Amino acid sequence: MQLETFFPYRLAVVAESFSRALIEVYGHEFGLSREEWRLLFLLAEEPEVDSLALARRTTLDKVQVSRAAQRLEDKGFITRDVAAHDRRLRVYRCTAAGRKLFQRVRVAVDERTRSILDEMSAADRKALDRGLNALLEAVTAFQAGPGGGSLQTK
Amino acid sequence: MQLETFFPYRLAVVAESFSRALIEVYGHEFGLSREEWRLLFLLAEEPEVDSLALARRTTLDKVQVSRAAQRLEDKGFITRDVAAHDRRLRVYRCTAAGRKLFQRVRVAVDERTRSILDEMSAADRKALDRGLNALLEAVTAFQAGPGGGSLQTK
DNA sequence: TATTGTTATACTCTATAACTATA
DNA sequence: TATAGTTATAGAGTATAACAATA
């Protein structure tokens, strides 16, 4: 089997290409890092999210969240407060400016995404969606399972 | 739409998780970088590959190829010679030690890959394969097309 | 003049550990 | 003692540019 037909290689290549296409938008065009973009995405949709939920739902670690949140706060896109119920946690909220920026970026990112996915047939898109969901479950199951406990064990 | 159901996010997360699972093998277990692993993969399969083909087929740039090739040469896994037909190019070949290492890594990587994909149904695997191939074509078409010429234009 | 490979440089990202505050 | 957030640091990875050799 050649490298080009090796499944892990194809997955990595396609994900990297897709990611680059979007970084051109939210990164180069709007000046957001991947971490900032993810945080803003989550916070723009909900009135408030605490630090634990934010890390878990963005699949970022606490260091990445802390730094991205600080940059977003410095730019005036989110606020950060100590959580009342547990003063070790933080509660993040999106500002009006943050929501406004998110809407602009979201439109541009969606447009770029669509311009790629529109090259595919509807059946192929459906297969991709199904296959990707299944793979996500498989990888998650594997990580929680026998061999890959190394991520959570710590 | 929530972040968790946003297609680009899911693609990035699943690809990153999968990649990590394999880096545990070829990286932590066998001490190869992603670039070295790709070069070795290609070279183990063919008697010789020149530098241009190597860069193109691994989707690495010339700097990455040059550095990864040097490390593989230092370790005794490949050889590097000036190409006879064009002295600007190099011709790379895998050594016996390189092939031996590759076989061991390949077995371990395949085992890890299978242990993840085996969590999926056959129909889901088929959908994934189809969808991923279509997406790869779509992204490639997009890059060559109107908006994304920025990669090749230079 | 253009292309290839190499080297150099700066920048970003990642992983890990230390430190402070809170539980 | 354990957990959360922050800060610090080192290592790996990425992007770009300069350079020498060759076409």
Image: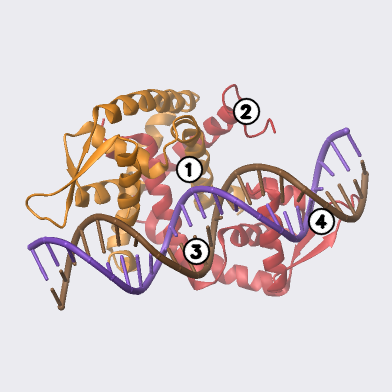
Chain colours: A orange, B red, C purple, D brown
Tell me how far mark 4 sits from mark 2, CA to CA: 28 Å
- The answer as to whether the residues below labels 1 and 3 share one chain is no
Separation of marks 2 and 3 at Cα, in angstroms:
35 Å
Instruction: Locate residue B71, reporting x and y percent.
Output: 67, 67
The mark closer to the camera, 4 or 3, is 4
Q: Which residue is mark 4?
A: B90
Q: Position of residue B12 (x, y in %)?
A: 41, 44
Same chain shared by disc 2 and disc 3: yes
**Mark 4 on the same chain as mark 2:** yes
Report the chain holding disc 3. B
Q: Are marks 1 and 3 in contact (CB under 8 Å)?
A: no
Q: Check contact, mark 4 vs mark 3: CB within 8 A.
A: no
Q: Secondary structure at mark 4?
A: strand
Q: Which of the image's four quarters has the N terminus of chain B? A: top left
* Residue B111 shown left or right of residue B73 in the figure: left
Q: CA distance from mark 1 to mark 3?
A: 19 Å
Check disc 3 and give the amino acid type.
Val
The circle on residue A1 is none
Dividing the picture into quadrants, the one containing residue B154 is top right
Chain letter, disc 2 residue? B
Residue at mark 1: A15
Mark 3 — residue?
Answer: B109
> Where A115 sits versus B61, above or below?
above
**Which residue type does callout 1 highlight?**
Ala
SS state under label 3 = helix
Q: Is disc 1 surrounded by few (<14), some (14 to 19) or many (20+) residues within 10 Å?
A: many
